Image: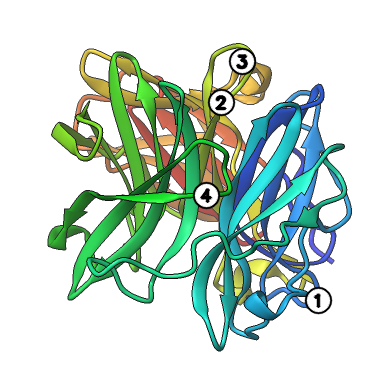
């Protein structure tokens, strides 16, 4: 059996992909995640659950959500991605429920202790997609702004990727606002959106299907209550083994981001009965007009300057691990490189997080 990761969360058994429901609740950090607990391959989705006191060491708990209702009974569906929201000291999980009959709808589960969840009797809380969207209607993410809960949902129509906007006062009754953001240049569906106020403006994040690099994009601009306007685009996460991140605001006021560190190539899995991991948590910041993603303070002691990891040949920079080398193709001046190496993964941070490379490698 291959050696487990030391500094990243990975499941005891089975498959994981997107991080869901990142939140600080009752004194601990919680990370939920897409999970198929039976084999190390994608299957009917459950919500796995882990907790941490320091964002580095994680304890896996019992499964939070099972696909046990008729509105989430699809074998190719189940409980898809979503988010967590704390309201009145109650934890709400808001997720996409997928059934063969109803397709992709949005549902809610509620917990008082952060461990045991009861699905809302009025599920699904959003049953139909609007005319501007399609049956690809998933990945709700909620942010509280100016006394209102705003939800973004991934969708697309006629090869135009779209992010839809809803609003609510109570997390259960939702009104459709309109299309927050769209564009054909990003692909037909913009997955796993996230939207929040950030350093004087608003930051919208989404992931693009079937992109080998820079799959996650950020649009930084103004919000008029309906649409994101006057935005600039940023893509610090270059990949290639990185997808579907989510953010949350912690009690220290940090905007923390965690992504899916994936290994779809079974050769990289080494015969293990588990697959996939979560990236090291990073803090987002803006500096000189650039979006940065750099490990949280709790994880910075894991960073390495080690010369044996960095190889410079003919003005090109490579990272070496065992007998494998990975290119650092940034396209700008490289002033600093920090490397976080685990037993089978490497994360490379260029210029304090201007560019982030994420690799899963075979041992």
Above or below: residue 44 compared with residue 58: below
What is the quadrant of residue 50 in the picture? top right
Above or below: residue 234 compared with residue 141: above
Q: Is there any visible trace of residue 278 in the rendered image?
A: no
Foreground mark, 3 or 2, reads 3
Q: Earlier in the sequence, mark 1 or mark 3?
A: 1
What is the x, y in percent for residue 270?
Answer: 71, 70
Above or below: residue 257 compared with residue 336: below
The residue located at (72%, 57%) in the rendering is: 120
Q: Earlier in the sequence, mark 3 or mark 2?
A: 3
* Nearer to us in this view, 270 or 234: 234
Q: What whole-number distance in Å separates the C-alpha atoms at marks 1 and 3?
A: 35 Å
Pick out the residue farthest to the left: 230
Helix, strand or loop status at disc 2: loop
Foreground mark, 4 or 3, reads 4
The residue located at (66%, 53%) in the rendering is: 277
Q: Say which residue label 2 marks.
A: 306
Q: Say which residue label 4 marks.
A: 173
Labels 1 and 3 touching (C-beta < 8 A) = no
Q: What whole-number distance in Å separates the C-alpha atoms at marks 3 and 2?
A: 19 Å
What is the x, y in percent for residue 344?
Answer: 65, 52
Q: Say which residue label 1 marks.
A: 38
Foreground mark, 2 or 4, reads 4
Answer few, some or many: residues within 10 Å of disc 1's Cα (few below 14, many 20 plus, some between 14 and 19). some
């Amino acid at each position: 059996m291959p050696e487990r990761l030391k500094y990243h969360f990975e499941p005891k058994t089975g498959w994981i992909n997107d991080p869901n429901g990142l939140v600080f609740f009752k004194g601990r950090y919680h990370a939920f995640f897409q999970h198929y607990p039976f084999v190390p391959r994608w299957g009917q989705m459950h919500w796995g659950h882990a907790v941490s006191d320091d964002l580095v060491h994680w304890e896996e708990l019992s499964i939070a959500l099972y696909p046990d209702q008729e509105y989430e009974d699809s074998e190719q569906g189940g409980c898809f991605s979503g988010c967590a929201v704390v309201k009145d000291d109650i934890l709400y999980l808001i997720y996409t429920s997928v059934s063969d009959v109803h397709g992709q709808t949005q549902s809610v589960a509620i917990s008082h202790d952060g461990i045991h969840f009861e699905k809302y009797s009025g599920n699904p809380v959003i049953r139909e997609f609007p005319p501007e969207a399609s049956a690809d209607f998933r990945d709700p993410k909620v942010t509280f702004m100016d006394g209102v809960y705003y939800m973004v949902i991934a969708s697309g129509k006629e090869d135009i990727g779209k992010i839809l906007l809803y609003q609510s006062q109570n997390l259960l009754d939702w009104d459709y606002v309109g299309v927050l953001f769209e564009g054909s240049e990003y692909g037909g569906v913009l997955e796993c959106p996230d939207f929040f106020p950030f350093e004087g403006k608003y930051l919208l994040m989404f992931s693009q299907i079937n992109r080998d690099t820079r799959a996650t994009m950020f649009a930084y601009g103004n919000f008029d209550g309906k649409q994101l306007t006057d935005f600039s685009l940023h893509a610090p996460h270059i990949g290639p083994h990185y997808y579907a991140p989510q953010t949350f605001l912690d009690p220290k006021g940090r905007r923390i981001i965690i992504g899916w560190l994936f290994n779809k190539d079974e050769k990289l899995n080494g015969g293990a009965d588990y697959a996939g991991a979560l990236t090291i948590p990073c803090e987002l910041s803006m500096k000189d007009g650039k979006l940065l993603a750099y490990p949280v303070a709790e994880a910075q002691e894991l960073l390495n300057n080690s010369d044996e990891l960095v190889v410079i040949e003919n003005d090109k920079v490579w990272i070496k691990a065992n007998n494998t080398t990975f290119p650092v193709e940034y396209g700008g001046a490289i002033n600093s490189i920090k490397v976080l190496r685990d037993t089978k993964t490497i994360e490379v941070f260029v210029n304090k997080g201007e560019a982030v490379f994420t690799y899963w490698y075979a041992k």
